[in-house]
């Protein structure tokens, strides 16, 4: 621990400013920025499509189960005596 502290302090105080990435550093209306935005929107659409499909599947299963239960349920609520 005692040997790591001076090395950590040396790295902390000698750090240089690093430039931003090429996508963030440039203009926001460049072709690269527009392409990156379209990629983000496409991935969001795919995510919503997958989650919507999973939700639709479970809704289908629940409705199907209730339909099958209604078909197999007896017509009268009172049992015969």
Image (cartoon, rainbow, N blue to C red):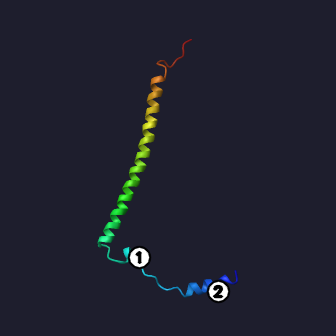
Which residue occupies the extreme top position in the image? 81
State the mark number for residue 64.
none
In which quadrant of the rendered image does the C terminus lie? top right
Where's residue 18, x and y in %? Answer: 46, 82
Which residue occupies the extreme right position in the image? 2
Q: Is residue 8 left or right of residue 52?
A: right
Q: Is residue 12 left or right of residue 25?
A: right
Q: How many marks?
A: 2
Residue at position x 68%, y 84% from top? Answer: 3
Residue that mark 1 sits on? 21
Residue that mark 2 sits on? 6
Q: Are marks 1 and 2 in contact (CB under 8 Å)?
A: no
Label 2 secondary element: helix
Where's residue 80, x and y in %? Answer: 54, 13
Label 1 secondary element: loop
Quick one: label 1 or label 2, which is nearer the N terminus? 2
Residue at position x 52%, y 85% from top? Answer: 15
Q: Is residue 57 above or below residue 71?
A: below
Where's residue 44, x and y in %? Answer: 38, 57
Residue at position x 47%, y 32% from top? Answer: 65
Where's residue 25, x and y in %? Answer: 37, 78
Residue at position x 45%, y 41% from top? Answer: 58
């Amino acid at each position: 621990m005692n040997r790591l502290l001076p090395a950590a302090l040396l790295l902390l105080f000698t750090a240089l400013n690093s430039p931003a990435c090429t996508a963030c550093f440039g203009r926001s209306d460049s072709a690269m920025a527009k392409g990156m935005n379209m990629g983000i929107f496409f991935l969001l659409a795919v995510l919503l499509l997958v989650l919507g499909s999973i939700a639709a599947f479970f809704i289908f299963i629940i409705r199907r189960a209730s339909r099958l239960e209604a078909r197999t349920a007896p017509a009268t609520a009172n049992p015969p005596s």
